[in-house]
Amino acid sequence: MTRGRFISLEGGEGAGKSTLLAGLREYIEQQGIDLVQTREPGGTALGEAVRSIVLDPAHRGLSGESELLLMFAARAQLVREVIEPALAAGRWVLCDRFTDASYAYQGGGRGQPVARIQALEQWATEGLRPDLTLLLDLPVATGRARAAGRGEADRIEVEADAFFERVRASYRQRAAQEPDRFRIVDASQSIEAVLRASLAAIAPLFEVSP
Ligand code: Z5A
């Protein structure tokens, strides 16, 4: 059994991940590939419970350490319950955010030490990284304008622009550090252009797949 391929989507608020996921999913399934779509935090009963805690504005007193640990608790469960079994069965996994989000949000945004995140990554995921990560990059103001009007902001969305600028810088730094894994997509383009660029970026994964 050939192991499946693992693709993650990253980006700031309103970058267009959910919009892109639908188009990517449709294309990949049209190729006859069995695909599992999931998200972080979430994707399991435990992960969805963690999601509702970390996004709930009522938990505004959550410490940076608690937030980081909760993200990794959800991730440890998702890897064991969903991602690893799917990849081992030859299925592809399309994940809306993965560990890079913790480096960007908890590391870049909140200032949690990178060494701490690296240790948790090793522990929770045993170093599992996506085969390819699409980073939907766009100016913070553009993303926030898109996301506005969706109702009440969640506990993370209420952060100031400076927080999201640090998140963006952290994502771009990670992409520069791992150019073989990351593909940066200009998310300020039209929805159609973002999908085209993303399909071009994932094309090599099909070539090496049986
Ligand atoms: N988080 C964390 O801190 N640490 C972690 O380790 C993990 C996560 C895993 C939940 O993530 C939060 O958890 C997130 C990071 C944190 N907090 N924040 N902020 P999420 O991914 O579920 O939530 P999100 O980042 O807030 O996603 P989003 O705002 O829903 O954005 P999106 O899915 O990327 O965007 P969208 O829904 O596809 O598009 C937004 C709007 O823009 C919508 O009206 C679209 O029609 C429109 N759109 C989309 N693409 C385009 C283009 N190309 N042009 C014009 N308009 C567009």
Image: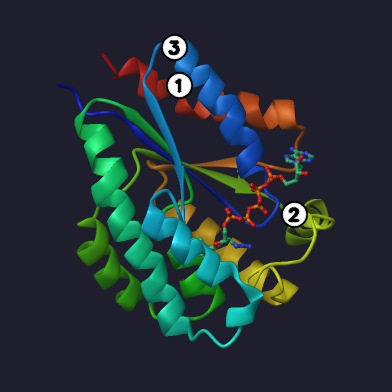
The residue type indicated by label 1 comes to Ala
Q: Quadrant of residue 141?
A: bottom right
Circle nearer the N terminus (3, 2): 3
**Can you say which quadrant of the picture contains the C terminus?**
top left
Q: Which mark is drawn over residue 31?
A: 3
Q: Is residue 124 above or below residue 111?
A: above
* SS state under label 2: helix
- Between the C-alphas of marks 3 and 2, the distance is 31 Å
x and y, in percent, of residue 5 in the image: 32, 31
Residue with the mark numbered 1: 203
The residue type indicated by label 2 comes to Gly
Q: Name which residue lies at 27% across and 34% down.
A: 86
Q: Is mark 2 within 8 Å of ligand 1?
A: yes
Asked if one can make out residue 94 in the rendered structure from this viewpoint, the answer is yes
Q: Name which residue lies at 28% across and 59% down.
A: 76
Instruction: Mark 3 and mark 2 in contact? Answer it, CB < 8 Å.
Output: no
**Which residue occupies the foreground of this view, 118 or 49?**
49
Within 10 Å of disc 3 (Cα), the crowding (few <14, some 14-19, many 20+) is few
The residue type indicated by label 3 comes to Gln
**Can you say which quadrant of the picture contains the N terminus?**
top left
Residue with the mark numbered 2: 143
Q: Is mark 1 within 8 Å of ligand 1?
A: no
Q: Which mark is in front, 1 or 3?
A: 3
- Between the C-alphas of marks 1 and 3, the distance is 11 Å
